[in-house]
């Protein structure tokens, strides 16, 4: 006798005719999980005690709480371990920022607007060049840097004019007027740092003289040449691109991301920028790399920095920003939104016009290629700000909102499930943040609470099988369903060559639609059909479903 036995359950494949799908694939898989090869319910987000403002688009965990942002930002903790200032860094649409406790500052330390001046003290002997004392005469130059209240040092001023003096004689240095430092952290502890040229040392350059409070106007330099200290380290330490359109015509830094060895990366237009290791305020221009196409977003992976662009993606690798190299894969896909580029734990995923791309090492794979046609994906999936993705325990969770028909939803792609990867959920969120400390994807629930994805109570799932085609017209007399608890809602459809449903779904006649209260249920008679499909709706666990012509076929 003939039977249909559904022992394995999987996800949907909208690009495949429902009559030609693998047995485990589904026409509908809403709010489903496939743990232990059984059919289970996805769970609602589990709310925390944090209520989100309606305008919130991003969150970041900070000091046992959460910081909310009214736009989608990129944020990271300090690369410095046990940071005494409890700083975190972020980029938004205006300019890069650093937050310390409740205070927010511009990221970076500006270059002084003017350089110092140097003169001999009043009453000092006039320097007269004479063949007998030429070795005692030297020309010295001074420059200064600004040091903020965090101790971060900026790039140097222009040097002073050269001053001739007898070696190691005192010099009066006049500092520039205190510059306008709006938005930067130049409170208590901020200072001038003074450097002097020293051509008599093995390493010719500017060496450290002293630190002085910002209010200082002049000081007398009496430090001997052999007591000068370290060379100027900050010659190239510009702040990151910001809202100064004259200096940065491509706009402010975006997409801030922390990588290995204390390196932060960000981008603007076609250029990727990198900070000095463990110094997030310093972004030397020589560390930047320019791509061919405009950049959508970046994410660090085990293979380096993935740069998703509007054209071919690139990978940037290396252990130090001074020695980075760029690799362009032979096969890659342009991205469609910066908000769908997700760190999956050493590898990454992002959306493209043809589907969803997985990047492992330097290998790019269109993982939805066997599940949906390119043109169908392009018509179905929004782009830009209308999509948002996150990582939920290795599952790619993609929220979408279509303005053309005012619909919204979420698809979940779990590559650990192989061909059973794609399911949908009725839940939607405009917030998604992976909390690495707890391994949770944090989202907005339907009551505006910040919630843990898939950690609440069970949702109701709906799973609809492929269309099974019998070799000849058949009437199945019995339904067998094994579940942990009953009742379970089961709907059975049957018909003849009735392919008239949406893409990926069939349209057959409903023959049975009831709450099943036990393992075996008699089905209606009086008809035969060659095409059969069934759906299961529940909020618990279903082990298998079968249709039998005869009771002797049951398990």
Image (cartoon, grey):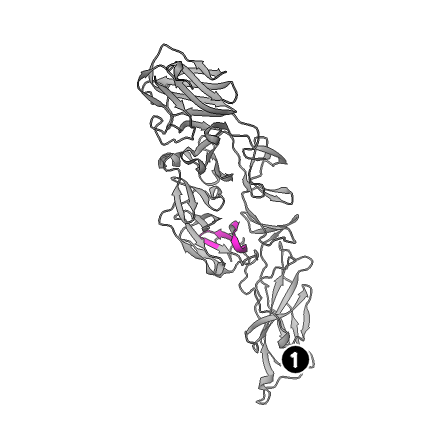
Residue at left 64%, top 74%?
A: 227
Q: Where, by quadrant of the figure, is residue 547 drawn?
A: top left
Q: Where, by quadrant of the figure, is residue 364 drawn?
A: top left
Image x and y of residue 96, in percent = 56, 51
Residue 503, above or below 486: below
Of residue 232 and residue 182, the one placed in the foreground of this image is 232
Residue at left 52%, top 25%?
A: 540
Residue at left 59%, top 59%?
A: 109
Image x and y of residue 454, in percent = 54, 33
Q: Where, by quadrant of the figure, is residue 326 drawn?
A: bottom left
Of residue 539 and residue 434, the one placed in the foreground of this image is 539
Secondary structure under tag 1 reads loop
Q: Is any atom of residue 406 visible in this view?
A: no
Point out the residue furthest to the left here: 472
Of residue 327 and residue 73, the one placed in the foreground of this image is 327
What residue does disc 1 label? Answer: 169
Position of the C terminus, as image quadrant, is top left
Q: Is residue 238 magenta?
A: no
**Label 1: how many Cα within 10 Å (few below 14, some 14–19, many 20+):** some
Q: Which residues are magenta?
A: 256-272
């Amino acid at each position: 006798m003939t039977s249909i036995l559904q022992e394995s359950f999987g996800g949907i494949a909208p690009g495949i005719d429902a009559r030609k799908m693998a047995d485990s694939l589904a026409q509908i898989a809403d709010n489903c999980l496939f743990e232990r090869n059984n059919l289970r319910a996805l769970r609602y987000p589990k709310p925390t005690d944090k209520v989100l403002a309606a305008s919130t688009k991003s969150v970041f965990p900070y000091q046992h709480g959460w910081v909310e942002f009214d736009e989608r930002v990129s944020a990271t903790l300090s690369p410095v371990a046990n940071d005494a200032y409890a700083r975190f860094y972020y980029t938004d649409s205006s300019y890069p920022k650093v937050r310390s406790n409740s205070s927010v500052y511009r990221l970076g330390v500006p270059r002084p607007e003017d350089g110092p001046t140097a003169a001999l003290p009043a009453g000092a002997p006039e320097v007269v060049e004479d063949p007998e004392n030429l070795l005692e005469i030297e020309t010295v130059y001074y420059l200064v840097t600004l040091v903020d209240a965090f101790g971060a040092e900026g790039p140097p001023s222009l040097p002073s004019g050269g001053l001739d003096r007898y070696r190691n004689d005192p010099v009066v240095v006049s500092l520039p007027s205190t510059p306008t430092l709006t938005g930067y952290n130049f409170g208590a502890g901020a200072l001038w740092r003074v450097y002097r040229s020293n051509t008599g040392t093995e390493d010719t350059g500017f060496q450290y003289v002293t630190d002085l409070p910002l209010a200082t106007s002049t000081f007398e330099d009496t430090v001997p040449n052999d007591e000068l200290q370290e060379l100027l380290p900050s010659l190239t330490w510009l702040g990151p691109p910001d809202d100064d359109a004259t200096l940065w015509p491509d706009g402010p830094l975006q997409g801030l991301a922390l990588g290995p060895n204390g390196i932060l990366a960000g981008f603007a237009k076609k250029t990727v920028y990198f900070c000095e290791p463990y110094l997030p305020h310093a972004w030397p221009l020589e560390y930047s790399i320019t791509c061919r196409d405009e950049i959508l977003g970046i994410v660090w992976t085990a293979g380096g920095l993935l740069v998703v662009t509007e054209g071919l993606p690139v990978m940037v690798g290396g252990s130090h920003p001074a020695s980075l190299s760029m690799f362009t894969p032979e096969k890659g896909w342009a991205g469609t939104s910066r908000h769908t580029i997700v760190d999956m734990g050493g590898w990454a995923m992002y959306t493209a016009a043809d589907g969803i791309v997985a990047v492992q090492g330097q290998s790019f794979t269109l993982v939805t290629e066997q599940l949906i046609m390119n043109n169908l994906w392009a018509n179905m999936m929004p782009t830009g700000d209308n999509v948002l993705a996150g990582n939920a325990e290795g599952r790619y969770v993609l929220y979408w909102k279509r303005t053309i028909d005012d619909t919204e939803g979420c698809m979940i792609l779990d590559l650990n499930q192989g061909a059973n990867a794609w399911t949908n959920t009725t839940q939607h969120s405009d917030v998604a943040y992976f909390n690495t400390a707890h391994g949770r994807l944090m989202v907005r629930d339907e009551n505006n609470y910040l919630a843990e994805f898939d950690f609440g109570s069970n949702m109701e799932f709906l799973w609809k099988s492929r269309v099974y085609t019998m070799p000849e017209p058949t009437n199945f007399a019995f339904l067998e369903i094994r579940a942990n608890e009953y009742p379970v809602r089961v709907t059975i459809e049957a018909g003849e060559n009735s392919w008239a449903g949406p893409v990926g779904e069939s349209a057959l006649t409903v023959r049975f639609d009831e709450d099943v209260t036990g393992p075996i249920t008699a089905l209606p008679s009086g008809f035969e059909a060659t095409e059969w499909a069934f759906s299961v709706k529940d909020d618990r666990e279903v082990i298998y479903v079968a249709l039998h012509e005869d009771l002797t076929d049951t398990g």
